[in-house]
Amino acid sequence: MVQDIFPHHFENTFMHRPPQPEDFVLAYDGDRLLMAHDGGITLPTVAQISGPLQYLFTLDDRGYYLLEAPAPSAPAGFAYEGSREYRSWEPAETRYACAVAESLHRWYRGNRFCGCCGTPMEKSKTERAMVCPACGNTVYPKICPAVIVGVCDGDRLLLTKYNGRVTKQYALVAGFAEIGETIEETVRREVFEEVGLKLGQLRFYKSQPWVFTDTLLMGFYAQLHGDDAIRLQEEELSLGQWFHRSELPDDHSGISLTGEMIETFRRGQDPFSLARHGQQHPLEV
Ligand SMILES: [Zn+2]
C-alpha cells in the first residue's frame, strides 16, 4: 500500500530541526507540488530554493520542509504536479513523503486564522498545533476516520462502484465516521445505508493513512447476517454486486487498502477464510 515503504523510515515526531542544504523543499502552487519527473520523483533541495521553511518530517534522516512563501518559478527541469499524477510514480518512499506533506500543507494553509475569533493563528512551539493568541483556541492536524468494509458471505465478496468517480475500478463499501458513534457502528451503518445489508461478526484487518484526503481508513471484513438481497443507495453507488472468490478482479495497483482487501479475499487470506481452515490472521505490527 502507499504507506508501505520499508526499509525506508518515516519519522514525523514534532521537533525543531534547522534545515541542511541537502534537505528537501516542498513548494506548492495551490495543491500542486514542485518536482522533477525524470523517470522518478525528484524534489528540490534547500540549496536550490530559498525562503521561510517549516519543518515537516524526516525520511531516512533527510529533512522535508514546507516553503511558506508564494510559489517560486520552477527551476529548469522542474514543474508543479498534482497528486493524481504523482501517486503512481516511483520511488514509493518519495511519493509517500509528498502525499503526507500535501496533507500538512492543506492544514497549515487552512488554519491561518482562528475559527472562533478570526485572529491570526500562531504555531505552537511545543507540538504540531496552531494556537490563537487571543482566545487560546488550539487546532491539531485534521484526520478524518473512515471505514472500508469487505462484506463477506462464504466465498462471496460484495463489490461496489461509486457514482461520479473518475476511477472505474471496483470498490468496497466505505464511509466516514459520524460524531458520537464507534467505528464498529460506522461499519454497520454504512453497509446498511449503502447496500441495505445487515452484518454479523466484524474482523479488523488493517488501517491506512489515506493522506490524499486527510483520512485514516480502517479496513474491516464483515460477515453477512440474514438476507443477501442488495438494496442500493443510488445517489452514492452505481453498482453493488456479489462476486465469487474466483471471479474477483486482480488488477489492483497495490496502492490502496481497498485493492489489498479485495486481493486478500481473492486469495482466501482474509480472517474469515483463515478461521474456517483453523488458521489465525497474522496481524502485522
Ligand atoms: Zn481565537
Image: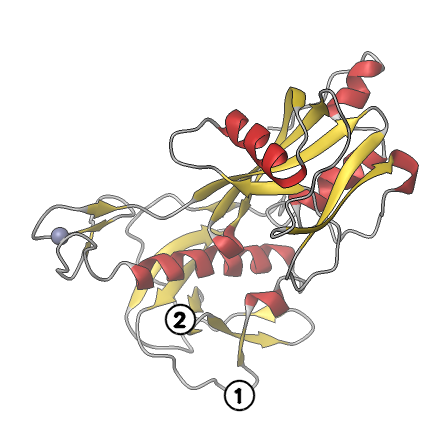
Res 76 label: 1
The residue at the point 76 percent across, 42 percent down is 159
Q: Position of residue 156 (x, y in %)?
A: 83, 31
Cα separation between marks 2 and 1: 16 Å
Q: Position of residue 84 (x, y in %)?
A: 60, 66
User: Residue at 64% across / 62% down in the picture?
Assistant: 164
- Neighbour class for label 1 at 10 Å: few (<14), some, many (≥20)? few
Q: Nearer the viewer, residue 217 or 285?
A: 217
- The x and y percentages for residue 150 are 70, 34
Residue 46: mark in rendering: 2
Q: Secondary structure at mark 1?
A: loop
Residue type, numbered disc 2: Val
**Rendered position, 221 above or below 102:** above
The residue at the point 85 percent across, 47 percent down is 249
Q: From what the image shows, is residue 157 above or below residue 43? A: above
Mark 2 Cα within 10 Å, few/some/many (few <14, many 20+)?
many
Hey, which residue is sitting farthest right in the picture?
Answer: 246
Amino acid at pointer 1: Ala
Residue 96 spot, x, y in % from top left = 56, 55
Colouring scheme, one of rainbow, by chain, secondary structure, one colour: secondary structure
- Viewed as shown, does residue 205 lie left or right of 24? right
Mark closer to the chain start, 2 or 1:
2
Q: Quadrant of residue 284?
A: top right
Taking the image as shown, residue 9 lies to the left or right of residue 197, namely: left
Left of 137 or right of it: where is 241? Answer: right
- Outermost residue to the left: 134
Q: Is mark 1 within 8 Å of ligand 1?
A: no
Residue situated in front as seen by the camera: 133 or 199: 199
